[in-house]
Image (spheres, grey):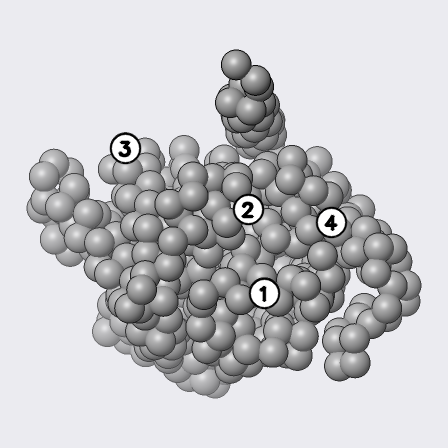
């Protein structure tokens, strides 16, 4: 299926432009991680941490160049799932869709919801456990589902509001913190080992992950051939600048103390440069940031479920579009309910372990899909984005992702393999059931 045939009418409204897509990407990527990332990376690499950001930007750039080309070719809903299914067929599509909406999005959103509840519980202990905690989580996912069901514009508007609310304190910290930097703290005294650099690159890679979720709404993006590459460039470019600026301010302000502050480094920086109220402001920003990432996921990921249902990989009822609001309402309800269920029963660490490996496998599939789709349809539509240098970028992207997979711990690799194996078993069972139904009596 090429650019032309994939742009079929799905009953959805194409209302997402370049700026909305770019803001959505920033909202999805800038989550809870940035508030602890500077200390964690400094503990691995010391003052050389900023160099790791530059290297990671190149790695991430390779992956999202692949997304930019495939996203310009395949314009139907589903994002990563649709790209992989388009290139490799229904089996790969089923595995990708399950890894994407369950292995990555549902579990990571459940982990974020747990982190959000814990952060609020620090100020309101009643939310630490029991019925109040459960009621809060149910209300949280219920509100996000409602906002996204009543219309695409309301979901996009919530994303824009939370993006501004989370970025404003971070930008304030950067502007004020630049005047508090001690340049001696930025000098690199000792270069890190290859092992430490690999571990830090893995952490940083996951800190940049999430932009692909914004492409799950491909069926609602205006002029995807132009909007997808531009939105990716806008969003990821702004994120890179923000991350480097925050790391520079944190390192330049705290110096060697940054490596020992892995729980709330930006809050420590804010307290030093802004006073006591600065730390509280960053705590509030962290809460808003997590909420914003959740709102972005509930806007985007149900489109994967919607698209998979349209293709017959999930029950058909999830492909229904609300007659009034023109949104995949049942897919949104199902996604929110699944995230809420896992949040009620799991801890942050348990949920995050499985999610981390799933997204790497998705990235690998998208990188390879560039080569397959090019071979199948080498012609380029006028105005359509195409990565220069032939097959070099997608091949390098695949190699880097495989390298990152080997940086995983044994527990992460085992959990990822178990999820992948369970997905394959479910597919085989499903196909056996379908064959039995088609068999003559």
Residue tagged 1:
8
CB under 8 Å between callouts 1 and 2? no
Rendering coords of residue 304 (x, y %): 49, 52
Left or right: where 335 falls relative to 220: left
Cα distance between the residues tagged 3 and 1: 39 Å
Question: At numbered mark 4, what does the secondary structure look like: helix, strand or loop?
Answer: helix
Cα distance between the residues tagged 2 and 3: 31 Å
Rendering coords of residue 387 (x, y %): 81, 68
CB under 8 Å between callouts 2 and 3? no
CB under 8 Å between callouts 4 and 3? no
Circle 4 packing at 10 Å, graded few (<14), some (14-19), many (20+), is: many
Cα distance between the residues tagged 4 and 3: 36 Å
Q: Which mark is residue 311?
A: 2
Cα distance between the residues tagged 1 and 4: 17 Å
CB under 8 Å between callouts 1 and 4? no
Cα distance between the residues tagged 2 and 4: 14 Å
Q: Nearer the viewer, mark 2 or mark 4?
A: 2
Question: At numbered mark 1, what does the secondary structure look like: helix, strand or loop?
Answer: loop
Residue tagged 3:
345
Mark 2 or mark 4: whose residue is earlier in sequence: 4
* Location of the N terminus (image quadrant): bottom right
Q: Nearer the viewer, mark 4 or mark 3?
A: 4
Q: Write the residue at 73% across / 62% down.
A: 2
Q: Look at the picture and state if 222 lies above or below 27.
A: below
Front residue of 250/377: it is 377
Q: Look at the picture and state if 155 lies above or below 302.
A: below
The image quadrant of residue 73 is bottom right
């Amino acid at each position: 299926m090429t650019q032309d045939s994939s742009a079929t009418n799905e009953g959805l409204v194409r209302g997402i432009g370049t700026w909305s897509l770019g803001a959505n990407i920033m909202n999805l990527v800038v989550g809870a991680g940035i508030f602890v990332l500077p200390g964690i990376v400094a503990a691995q690499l010391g003052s050389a941490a900023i160099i790791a950001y530059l290297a990671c930007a190149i790695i991430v750039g390779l992956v999202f160049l692949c997304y930019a080309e495939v996203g310009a070719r395949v314009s139907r809903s589903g994002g990563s799932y649709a790209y992989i299914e388009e290139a490799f067929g229904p089996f790969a599509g089923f595995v990708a869709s399950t890894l994407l909406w369950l292995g990555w999005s549902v579990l990571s959103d459940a982990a974020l919801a747990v982190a959000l509840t814990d952060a609020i519980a620090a100020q309101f202990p009643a939310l630490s456990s029991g019925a109040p905690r459960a009621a809060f989580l149910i209300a949280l996912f219920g509100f996000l589902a409602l906002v996204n069901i009543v219309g695409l514009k309301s979901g996009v508007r919530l994303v824009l509001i939370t993006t501004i609310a989370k970025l404003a304190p971070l930008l304030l910290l950067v502007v004020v913190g630049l005047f508090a930097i001690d340049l001696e703290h930025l000098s690199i005294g000792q270069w890190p080992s290859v092992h430490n650099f690999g571990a830090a690159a893995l952490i940083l890679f996951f800190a940049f992950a999430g932009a692909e979720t914004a492409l799950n709404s491909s069926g609602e993006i205006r002029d995807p051939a132009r909007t997808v590459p531009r939105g990716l460039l806008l969003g990821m470019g702004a994120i890179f600048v923000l991350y480097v600026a925050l790391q520079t301010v944190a390192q330049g302000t705290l110096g060697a103390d940054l490596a020992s502050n892995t729980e709330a480094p930006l809050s420590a920086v804010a307290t030093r440069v802004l006073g006591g109220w600065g730390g509280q402001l960053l705590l509030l920003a962290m809460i808003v940031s997590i909420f914003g990432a959740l709102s972005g996921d509930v806007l985007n990921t149900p489109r994967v479920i919607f698209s998979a249902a349209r293709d017959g990989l999930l029950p058909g009822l999830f492909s229904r579009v609300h007659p009034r609001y023109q949104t995949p309402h049942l897919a949104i309800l199902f996604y929110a309910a699944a995230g809420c269920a896992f949040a009620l029963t799991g801890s942050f660490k348990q949920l995050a372990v499985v999610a981390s490996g799933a997204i790497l496998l998705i990235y690998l599939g998208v990188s390879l899909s560039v080569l397959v789709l090019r071979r199948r349809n080498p012609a380029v539509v006028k105005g359509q984005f195409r990565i220069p240098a032939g097959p070099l970028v997608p091949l390098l992207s695949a190699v880097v992702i495989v390298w990152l997979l080997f940086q995983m711990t044994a527990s992460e690799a085992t959990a990822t393999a178990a999820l992948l194996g369970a997905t394959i078993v479910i597919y085989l069972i499903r196909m056996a059931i379908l064959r039995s139904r088609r068999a003559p009596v």
